[in-house]
Amino acid sequence: MGRLVVIEGLDGAGKRTFASALTAALHDAGATVSSLAFPRYDDDVHAELARDALYGRMGDLASSVHAMAVLFALDRRDAAPQLSAALATHDVVLVDRYVASNAAYNAARLGQDAAGEVVGWVRALEIDRFGVPVPDHQLLLAPPREVAAERARLREATEPGRERDAYESDAGLQARTDDVYRELAATGWLSAWTVVGSTGGADPADPAALVPVLLDPPASGPETELG
């Protein structure tokens, strides 16, 4: 059985670039890798509806924290068989955003921290009720917030069709979400975590340094930091 590795972080944290580099490093180590990114806006109707809501096309749907959380959770529920099949045939299944993003963003929207009600509610919904696979390791990309924000603004200006949605354009929400992410990592929510790039640099550390941790992890341990 393969290992489910999740990359989390704010919009503009560099998840897509880091995922590509980490995939290459895992391949160099001889591992087989399958990749998936959430939300699957073009492949799942629940994610499509969530995207429409974030761009103001679904009336007041986006104003409901729990309704939006359910839509994102249903996207992962639909993908659970695909994830399980990939875990059966690959050493690593690398996922860009997963259950922790639902917990962090919605806790931030409600002004709660990682110990708040909605984080427990998300876990009960996605892990216990929907039965999505539990991560084996979660990576939090944590560049300075201003770096992530500038990357998101640049992406919007230079990439057609990448206009920021209601979450991405809310600087206060992004800051609160970053706080919750760091708390989830510190408490080992759902799995062991590694915080990447938290020492102030704009770029995360070398992904190759993560390969031994991801392929031959310790039995247990606290949050670690890389770069």
Image (cartoon, grey):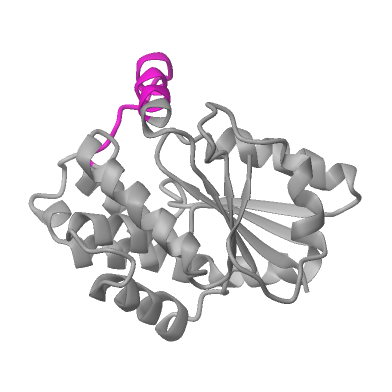
Image location (x, y in percent) of residue 101? 40, 56
Where, by quadrant of the figure, is residue 130 drawn?
Answer: bottom left
Q: Is 144 placed left or right of 165 in the picture?
A: right
Residue 48 x/y as whole percent: 34, 50
Residue 123 seen anywhere in this rendered image of the structure: yes
- Give the residue furthest to the right: 30
Location of the C terminus by quadrant is top right
**Side (left or right) of 178 relative to 201:** left
Q: Which span of residues is magenta-colored?
A: 149-166
Q: What residue is rendered at 62% in x and 37% in y?
A: 18
Q: Is residue 112 above or below residue 225?
A: below
Name the side, left or right, on which 43 lies relative to 26.
left
In the rendered image, residue 156 lying in the magenta stretch gets the answer: yes
Q: Residue at x 57, y 38 (%)?
A: 197
Q: Is residue 83 shown above or below 203?
A: below
- Residue at 41 percent of width and 55 percent of height: 181
Residue 140: x and y in percent read 53, 50
Q: Residue reaching furthest left? A: 60
